[in-house]
Image: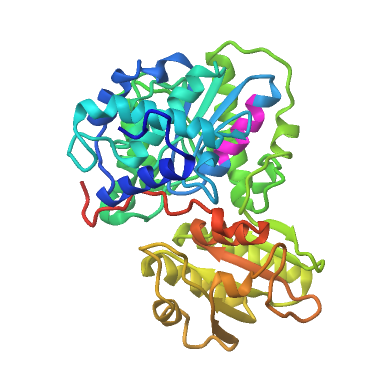
């Protein structure tokens, strides 16, 4: 059992949940179905939107949440990973799950899971499965009018795929987690398309042609009506909706969110007033080219560009930034995996005056030597090795000295962004970042 009779503290609960990650991710949805049945199938008690995709899931989910809430709905939001605190993953009307609720839900879920064995047993739920069940319980018990649910990894075998949503969406397709999802665009697309349900409408973001063929084929086989962003908005980015999140890729995400919202309102017969344009321009989604002011007035930008597809967007954003400021920025970089680090550091080397390499506090993070090896040989700027504690030693403070007009940009892993955000808030010791299932080395 997770709790003593008097109940466990939040720290004890987090430690217990954290211990589950050592058993790794468990693919397949049979365990999730069993767990759901044991707690009353809460996912059946609210209308859901289900999103998959290599990138853009989180931003699109945040946009959708903003749109739905602008209609006066009570909206649940389930995303991963979190940046600083575990409760960020499960929000209702953008209020994260608090510590007391996490303890109560964890106790209930461990009690329900005990019938399947003990932690580490094949049938005992993984960390992500327990978090998914926690989200479903929360959204059911708070009587959400809608819930936006993001897949964790892939789609077909993801724990969230026990949903029967009103509409689903696939935001983008790229080559990431290839050891688990397949080494081709077509294979990744097939895994993501696993969230498509018979007769349930599908919105398709801007994906490669090879991926679109696969996804359309799956939708056709399942009788699921499909509309693509390109069909609605074309290829001219100026025709896409505006959003306060920076970058052309975010306008494409905004187009996906707009189409999903329209279908959801149609499917649920919601005719409440609400302005989609205003909602898209008031989205709160941290660490997506997020601008922050340091205590000394300098600007710090944080962006979770963490894989090859993100590197393309980062390239465009850095180009626009330098064109506007006329100065090459200093980049603080940390990435998980050399396959991800190589395209990101190629882009950064094109634009940076200085590169500061750091290692996020994660098992899969690249070493400083591995990061350095990913920097092209023709990079003419300066390279330094450091860590988050040294660069961000106090609340609102960055120790990096800059020239007038020189920007400081943090780019790379979500975990690096979370560490920096916690350090800037002065609560680095309270960070709950090490909560994530370890990933297996082979495709399921």
The image quadrant of residue 131 is top left
In the rendered structure, the answer to whether residue 74 lies left or right of residue 326 reads left
In the rendered structure, the answer to whether residue 338 lies left or right of residue 145 reads left
Of residue 443 and residue 402, the one placed in the foreground of this image is 402
How many numbered discs sit on the rendered protein?
Answer: 0
Residue plotted at (69% across, 37% down): 280
The image quadrant of residue 349 is bottom right
Is residue 230 a member of the stretch shown in magenta? Answer: no
Residue 202 visible? The answer is: no
Residue 60 in the image: state x and y as whole percent. 56, 39
Residue plotted at (26% across, 56% down): 179
Residue 160 in the image: state x and y as whole percent. 37, 32
Q: How is the image coloured?
A: rainbow
Residue plotted at (32% across, 31% down): 110
The image shows residue 435, relative to residue 146, as above or below, that is: below
Residue span colored magenta: 60-68
In the rendered structure, the answer to whether residue 296 lies left or right of residue 71 reads right
Give the main secondary structure of the magenta stretch. Answer: helix
Residue 309 in the image: state x and y as whole percent. 47, 57
Residue 201 in the image: state x and y as whole percent. 45, 23
The image shows residue 436, relative to residue 318, as above or below, that is: above
């Amino acid at each position: 059992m997770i709790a003593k009779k008097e109940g466990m503290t939040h720290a004890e609960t987090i430690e217990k949940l954290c211990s589950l990650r050592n058993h790794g991710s468990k693919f397949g949805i049979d365990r999730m179905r069993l767990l759901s049945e044991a707690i009353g199938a809460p996912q059946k008690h609210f209308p859901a939107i289900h999103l998959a995709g290599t990138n853009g899931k989180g931003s699109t989910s945040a946009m959708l949440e903003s749109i739905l809430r602008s209609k006066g709905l009570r909206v649940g939001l389930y995303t991963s990973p979190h940046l600083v605190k575990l409760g960020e993953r499960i929000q209702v009307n953008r209020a994260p799950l608090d510590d007391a609720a996490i303890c109560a839900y964890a106790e209930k879920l461990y009690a329900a899971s005990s019938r399947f064995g003990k932690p580490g047993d094949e049938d005992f739920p993984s960390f992500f499965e327990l978090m998914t069940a926690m989200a479903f319980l929360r959204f059911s018990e708070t009587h959400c009018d809608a819930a936006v649910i993001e897949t964790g990894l892939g789609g077909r075998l993801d724990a969230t795929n026990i949903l029967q949503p009103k509409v689903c969406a696939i935001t983008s397709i790229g080559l990431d987690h290839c050891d688990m999802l397949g080494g081709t665009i077509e294979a990744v697309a097939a895994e993501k398309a696993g969230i498509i349900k018979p007769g349930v409408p599908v919105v398709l973001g801007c994906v490669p042609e090879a991926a679109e063929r696969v996804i359309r084929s799956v939708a056709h086989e399942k009788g699921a009506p499909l509309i693509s962003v390109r069909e609605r908005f074309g290829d001219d980015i100026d025709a896409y909706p505006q959003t306060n999140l920076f970058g052309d890729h975010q306008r494409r995400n905004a187009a996906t969110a707009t189409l999903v919202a329209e279908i959801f309102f149609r499917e649920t017969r919601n005719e409440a007033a609400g302005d989609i344009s205003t909602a898209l321009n008031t989205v709160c989604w941290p660490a997506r080219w997020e601008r922050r002011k340091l205590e000394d007035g300098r600007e710090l930008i944080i962006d979770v560009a963490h894989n090859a597809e993100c590197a393309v967007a980062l390239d465009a954003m850095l180009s626009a930034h330098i064109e506007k400021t006329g100065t090459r920025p200093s980049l603080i970089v940390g990435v998980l995996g050399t396959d991800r680090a190589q395209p990101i550091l190629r882009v950064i080397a094109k634009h940076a005056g200085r590169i500061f390499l750091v290692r996020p506090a994660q098992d899969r993070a690249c070493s400083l030597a591995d990061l350095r090896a990913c920097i092209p040989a023709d990079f003419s700027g300066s390279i330094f090795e450091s860590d988050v504690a040294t660069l961000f030693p106090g609340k609102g403070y960055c120790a990096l000295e800059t020239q007038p007009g020189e920007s400081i940009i943090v780019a790379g892993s979500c975990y690096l962004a979370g560490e920096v955000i916690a350090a800037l808030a002065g609560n680095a010791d309270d960070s709950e970042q090490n909560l994530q299932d370890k990933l297996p080395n082979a495709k399921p």
